Amino acid sequence: MASNEQILTTRQGHPVQYNQNMRTIGSRGPATLENYHFLEKISHFDRERIPERVVHARGFVAYGEFEATGKIGHEPASKYTRARIFSEAGKRTPLAIRFSTVIGGRDSSEGARDPRGFAVKFYTEDGNWDLVGNNLAVFFIRDAIKFPDVIHSLKPDPISFRQEPARILDFMSQTPESMHMLTHLFSPRGIPATYRHMEGFGVNTYKMVNAEGDTVLVKYHWHPRAGVASLSADEAAKVQGQDTGHATRDLFDAIERGEYPQWDFYVQIMEDHDHAELDWDPLDDTKIWPEDQFPLHHVGTMTLNRNVDDHHNENEQIAMGTGVLVDGLDFSDDKMLVGRTFSYSDTQRYRVGPNYLQLPVNSPKGLKGGPNTHQRGGLMSFGTDLAPGQNPHVNYEPSITGGLEEAEKKPNTPPEINGQLGPADLERTNDYLHGRGRVLHDERLGARPSGGGAGRHDPGGRPAGPGALPVAPVHDPRRLRQSCGRVHRQDGGGCEASSAASHAELHR
């Protein structure tokens, strides 16, 4: 006999005495409409799934904490930012992280050649900060107006519902800015061995703001203390044949064993102006900032130490967004960042609902007292954001009867912008020779980029068509050296060995 705490009930709290059969007239007779327990049970089952993410559908969430060094490199963090998350050595901030694949659906393989999502939600004392990035440092496009196009090209054909290499190559060959991302994707780093052995990058350019309102441009990097490990196409094919969720299994089991993965957090810093001396634009997310010119500065360490209690509540319903920034961190005019900021919050309201921020996994739990807003009502609202002593009758501002008030204004140096309003590409694109000393990827590696034989991005198949122009893949040798220094193949082959071994795979 179960204890009272373990008795099955309906969601209304009524004990369920019969859970094996519906109520019928006799053992073979018709069921009756007043089967409330059955109706509640089956109706909820019919609605258990919410729309999956258009991209990053398959993913896994874990929890942990971030410990700051109190410095950015050798300088006090306050020199660059007034964000309190970085302010003190040893300061710890709880966080959630979601690793994901990008193009496949919710049940797709984690062994495919595909970018990986690396999205972190910091529950800071100043509210949530979301850093939504990938495992590769650059992206396919630099203007958000092309985002639907690049994703459509990577997704299955709208008629055959098969991912067609010709469609991908058709788009990419007409989009020169994508070549940098393609060389990363088809390099040895294109198939991470596990989430624990994967780098993370903010990809977009952000700003930091200090107490005086001065700003700098920044790029964010995560480096795993376990090292970076990748799979070859053959290794990935073997893994996929045994377990399509191997990366989730690896992360979950490691945390359960108490082997808590860690990543060091770094920033690159650049003065906040257009840098006309560079032959590329700092706001271009298809470019990296060479580390010999803009070195990495260590700011802290992330440790993951807890798995989720419920996959749906904490993974399917977690909502990340590039617009979620705390005081001391700000946007740049990176065109992809601007577009992502609208798109992410828009899709969360469609996918999870207008009150998705009330869900525990999305609520700013690091904020004392919780959020104070005038937001009321809407689908599935289950609380009101009232400050202590706030007049509950006042859901507007300003008011002299005990309503909420504006926060104290802090110094800020807004940019001065001059120019003509209209659609325009960046002036310094340099899609083939980004940075100085750029060489052909073939010359650097001695072969072809790593093969696409595993997963969805196999570049074989029918040709893209007569309009497709061949584009020579190029790569920054400095970035390649940096990557090869951190990457170790499971067979010990390194970058050169992996590329040479996969030459045939690219064309098979």
Image (cartoon, rainbow, N blue to C red):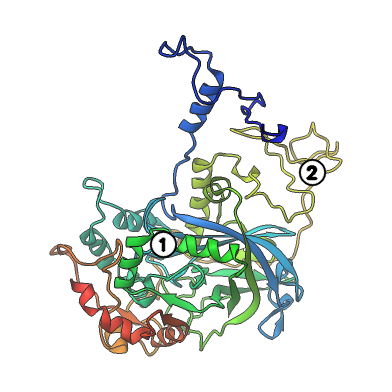
In-front residue for pair 107/88: 107
Residue 331 shows in this picture: no
Q: Which disc is residue 500 wearing?
A: none
User: Which percent across, then down, holds residue 465?
Assistant: 14, 62
Q: Which residue is drawn at 62% across and 67% down?
A: 258
Q: Is residue 503 left or right of residue 412?
A: left
Q: Relative to 393, say whether 267 is above or below.
A: below
Q: Relative to 210, say whether 320 is above or below.
A: above
Q: Is residue 428 left or right of residue 375?
A: left
Q: In this view, does 91 lie to the left or right of 292?
A: right
Residue 443 shows in this picture: yes
Residue pointed to by mark 1: 143
Callout count: 2
In which quadrant is the C terminus drawn?
bottom left
Q: Label 2 crowding class (10 Å Cα cut-off): few <14, some 14-19, many 20+?
A: many
In which quadrant is the N terminus drawn?
top right
Secondary structure type for disc 2: loop
